[in-house]
Image (tube, rainbow, N blue to C red):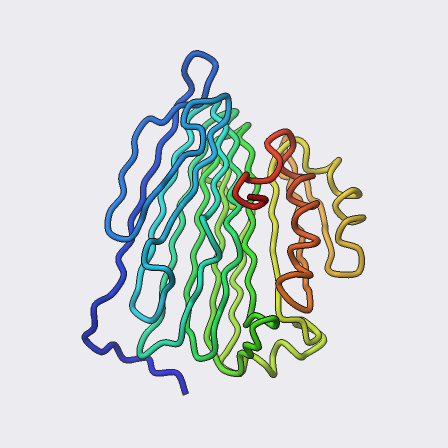
Amino acid sequence: MIRTDHPTLQRVRATGRLSVKHSDGRTRIDRLFQEGAAKIRFPAPESPAIEAVLINTAGGLTGGDTVDWTINAATGTRLTLTTQACEKVYRTAGGHAEISVSLKAGADARIAWLPQETILFDRSALRRRLDVDLAQGASILLLEATIFGRAAMGEHVETAMFSDRWRVRVEGSLVHAEDFRIGPDIAMQLAGPAMAGGGRAVATLLMIGDAAERMLEPARAIIGEHGGASHWRIGPSGKLLARLVATDGYALRARLIPLVGLLNGQAGLPKIWTS
């Protein structure tokens, strides 16, 4: 059984905040704050669009660790966010690891939140929260991918706790909400046909913007029988939601690479994904 008490141990505290602004036809860094295990690096800090790489220098998380990212993209900016590597969540000795992400985009801004996969180990516990606040005319692409043990490494997750909470608002109005919870009997639940049918890797992508509707059929062609995608109108814009299930992380990324490349338009894949 996973312990939920908190022994007195040194814990990871990672806080990163980034604001970008539009100036002279480019997206530029406005404010940057990093504390604890959080680091933010920029392959090209001043360009028409910025790609920011978020780093947890602790190399992984366990119970009681916290990571907090706050991102603000001002009017007219273009920003892609990814992570240096997959985030690993190890066996907990007590409590949950917690990851909180807050994204805000001004009018005509575009954010792509494209972290690499989160890997859960046996007897791990993770709470993840994503809050998004968009101005009218802003667009966003969100991705979260989770692997329940790496098949190539012989890892198998029998028991763990995982919850994922998303709230997305446009001009203060809620346009997308979901709460996903699984555990403690992870292996049994993933084996169910209504969950993952034995798959060990899952991903959710959400796109909000004017291009969402015309991306639906190309996205479905890439996903095939490994998930599904749907589209809704939300005022003058659109919402595309896609879910993928795969046998392992390798098979999942084989679908994610072309799908992210399609949905992220001219920005394409984060450079670190292919380096």
Query: Could you tell me which residue is drawn at 55 percent across and 27 percent down?
Result: 137
Considering every residue shown, the one lying at the far top of the view is 24
* 50 or 152, nearer to the observer: 152
- Residue 251 x/y as whole percent: 69, 61
Q: Is residue 104 left or right of residue 34?
A: right
Considering every residue shown, the one lying at the far bottom of the view is 1
Q: Is residue 220 left or right of residue 142?
A: right
- Residue 239 x/y as whole percent: 64, 42
Number of marks drawn: 0
Q: Is residue 253 left or right of residue 73?
A: right
- Image quarter of the C terminus: top right
Query: Could you tell me which residue is drawn at 56 percent across and 57 percent down?
Result: 145
- Residue 32 x/y as whole percent: 30, 34
- Residue 227 vs 93, above or below: the answer is above
Using the rendered view, name the quadrant where residue 194 is placed: bottom right
Query: Could you tell me which residue is drawn at 78 percent across and 42 percent down?
Result: 218
Query: Could you tell me which residue is drawn at 55 percent across and 62 percent down?
Result: 146
- Residue 60 x/y as whole percent: 38, 63
* 12 or 192, nearer to the observer: 12
